[in-house]
Amino acid sequence: MNFTFEQLFDFTKNIFVKIGCPERDAETAAEVLLSADLRGVDSHGVARLSGYVRLWEAGRINPNPNVKIIHETPSTAVVDGDGGLGLVVAPVAMKVAMDKARNVGTGWVSVKHSNHYGIAGYHAMQALQENMIGLSMTNASPLVSPTFSKERLLGTNPISIAIPAKEQPPFVADMATTTAANGKLEILQRKGENAPEGWIQGKDGNPTTNPYGVKEGGSLLPLGGDREHGSHKGYALGSIVDIFSAVLSGANYGPWVPPFVAFLEPDPNPVGEGLGHFFGAMRVDAFRPADEFKSHMDKWIERFRSSATTPGHEKVLIPGDPERELEQERRKSGIPLLNPVEKDLKALGKKFKVPFAE
């Protein structure tokens, strides 16, 4: 069944208010979460709402945090999220990065003591409205094994970069550094489908297509799947995100990252505070005139779009195209929810006495 953005936004905002978020923070959190559903990243949208509530019930989320800068230079800062929702902490930190870029050309912000922040792309895209290039990274639940390892030491650790253009839509790359995000496994579990080969390895280190393989002690694989297909590169990218997000900020890193998933418990001996993020903003005119740059971005995009295609494919896509097209469609026709997700949200509504999608 499809639901309008407004229906899901109001419901999500009201749930966040019920757990103690101030109205403005609840609106921000709902907007970030729903941006994933609009862009077709269903694994990171309202399907995750009950997960945030679960963390709040466990005392792992501060619904009314004092998010503050604890160290800074003209172009850099470290932000302490005070245990808040990453959905709220991350927009504050990205604004700090953009403020610094506005003043000195670039801004770089590392964050500690935060939680899951939704889709990386939302935060990177905030820079587009000010003729800036945006960058967003976060570490995540330790579900990923490095190449040649059976241990879960990294998260899906996404990277997003958003680049403005002039007449063309912006270039927006938003990707996990694993072959697939854990949320996609959750969708497969709800659908009763197997995982593609190359996504998961079992507890014994052998490949598996069991969508419950990670819950049963296995792990997600770095981008590439195995060494022969470049998993060492995915491993390196995930490591970079972990270091920039957490080793640099003072958050937990590697296997000590506090998990979002229900089947893992936080390590009793943390090495830092909460989960970490990293943000960057670069003013285009700190490098060349913005209009000149954006005209050349148009030329870049147009040339790639006109590329000769392989058999069976009509066009070459630019990063961000599928999500943008889905957002346009879903704003018109509504956001589809799987039955288990709808059931989960109705249960949340009943629990907090918030009518669902009315």
Image: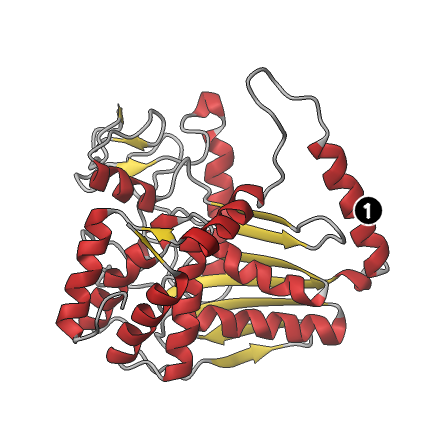
Q: Residues within 10 Å of mark 1 (few under 14, many from 20)?
A: some
Q: Residue 246 in the image: state x and y as whole percent.
A: 45, 61
Q: Quadrant of residue 311?
A: top right
Q: Which residue is mark 1?
A: 296
Q: Is residue 212 left or right of residue 273?
A: left
Look at 73% across and 30% down and name the residue there.
306
Identify the residue shown where x is 63% and y is 30%: 316
Whole-percent x and y of residue 89? 44, 72
Classify residue 348 as left or right of residue 82: left
Residue drawn at x 59%, y 42% is 319
Query: In the shown orientation, is residue 158 left or right of residue 22?
Result: right
Look at the image and tell me whether residue 244 can be seen. Answer: no
Q: Type of residue at label 1?
A: His
Relative image position of residue 130 (x, y in whole percent) = 70, 67
Q: Residue shown at 75%/68% (left/top)?
A: 105
Q: Which of the 4 quarters of the picture holds residue 12?
A: bottom left
